[in-house]
Amino acid sequence: MPSDISTYNFPTKIRFGPGSRHELTTELSILGMQRPLVVTDRDVAKLPWFSTIEDTLTDMPSATFRGVWGNPVVSQVTAGLEAYHHHQADGIVAVGGGAPMDVAKAIALMAHHPGHLFDYEDGASTRSIDQPIPSIVAIPTTAGTGSEVGRSAVISDDETHGKKIVFDPQLLPQVVLADPELLLGLPAKITAATGMDALTHLIEAFLAKGQNPLCDGIALEGIYLVSQHLKDCVDFAQKRAEIDQAAHLRARAGMLNASMMGAIAFQKGLGVTHSCAHALSTICDTHHGLANGIMLPAAMRFNLAAEPERFLRMARVVKPGAQSGQELIDWILSLSNSIGIPMSLKALGVSAETVDQLVSIAINDVCHPLNPRPVTKDDFYAIYRDALAA
């Protein structure tokens, strides 16, 4: 095996490094998977390297489901489940960003469970997850959600666009093939939005209520990796003719690690940024990472007074000589500006008239109860207005 591929077990097996995707058939054999269904989104399926992954599976009966796009919805899970049963699959290979990862997990859950997906909603389930869940091998192609190392899937209702979470430890992929080469061609806008998603996970996890020093340590290191690599990734994506391939690969590897660390850290919890972002995705169909990136400064301005010491600790990760937590927020704004994240909700076409709808969704979201500062309805109005005026 190539010497630059490492193995992490945390707790899922992660094979990390350039070329790790080529170990797919070996890992499927170890798992005993003989009839995989590849789940991906329609854009990833068009990329030149994707066919090489399908080609590695020619020695076993395999099929590909390409019916994922945008923010994943129940109908995509239903179509994927039909493909799973039609192929008589015995496991799943999830290839792509957060959307195909979440759809793959939902398909795996429903492969042997009756009823509707939302019968298994976390915290509101009417059915038990008590049947076997097929194995999943995950091959991430973005550095944002970190869903490849997560135990949950976020799926929206087709009609209301309301997001539901299904959760079970068995949804954790058994193997992750984390290959930074697959991220080299990501466009700058997707690189920036997914990178801000990872950063939001890390910051909100560190601030979330409760004791989890393991997650806190992972979050701080992840924030450091974002500070070192996200801008470089976006710069390389914008100036492809001037790319230093080795430096680009190091930057993508750094962000891929940061993304997984964010998803591991937010086992501790998330916060008000995510509640605001979920509402934006529901009402405005905004890309989740972009929504987080735009809302993060306003949300952190709201939180600063509640946890000044924790803000200072994060600020010193990105700026060792920092004297106050405000410097973290200043750094977020500078980073956002340098990678092209809009500074205001107005850039998304969000108007003041939309705020009522956004607040009605955000106040009922499951993330903000773990925010370090309690969030009332009036607070949500203030945070959204801050993000509009920025």
Image: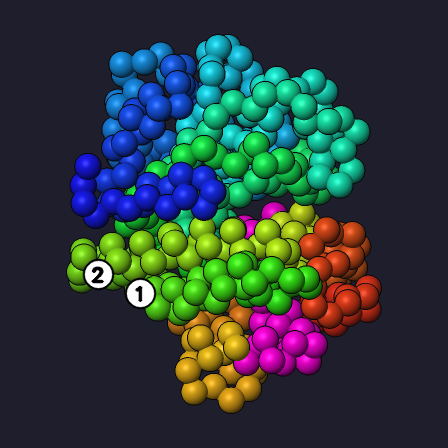
Q: Are marks 2 and 1 in contact (CB under 8 Å)?
A: yes
Q: Residue at x 41, y 82 (%)?
A: 320
Q: In the figure, residue 234 lies in which quadrant?
A: bottom left
Count of marks overlaid on the render: 2
Identify the disc placed on residue 247. 2
Q: Is residue 48 left or right of residue 224?
A: left
Marking on residue 232: 1
Does the magenta-highlighted stretch encompass residue 79? no
Residue in the foreground of this view, choosing between 14 and 299: 14
State the extent of the magenta-drawn residues as a range: 284-312
> Which amino acid does the dot numbered 2 rest on?
Ala
Badge number at residue 212: none
Q: Secondary structure at mark 2?
A: helix
Image x and y of residue 297, in percent:
58, 72
Q: Residues within 10 Å of mark 1 (few under 14, many from 20)?
A: some
Q: Rounded to the nearest whole Å, what is the CA distance between mark 2 and mark 1?
A: 9 Å
Which residue is pictured at 64% across the width and 69% down the height? 299
Please, is residue 128 above or below residue 335 in the view?
A: above
Horizontal and vertical percent for residue 295? 60, 65
Q: How is the image coloured?
A: rainbow
- The secondary structure that most of the magenta stretch takes on is helix
Name which residue lies at 77% across and 66% down.
375
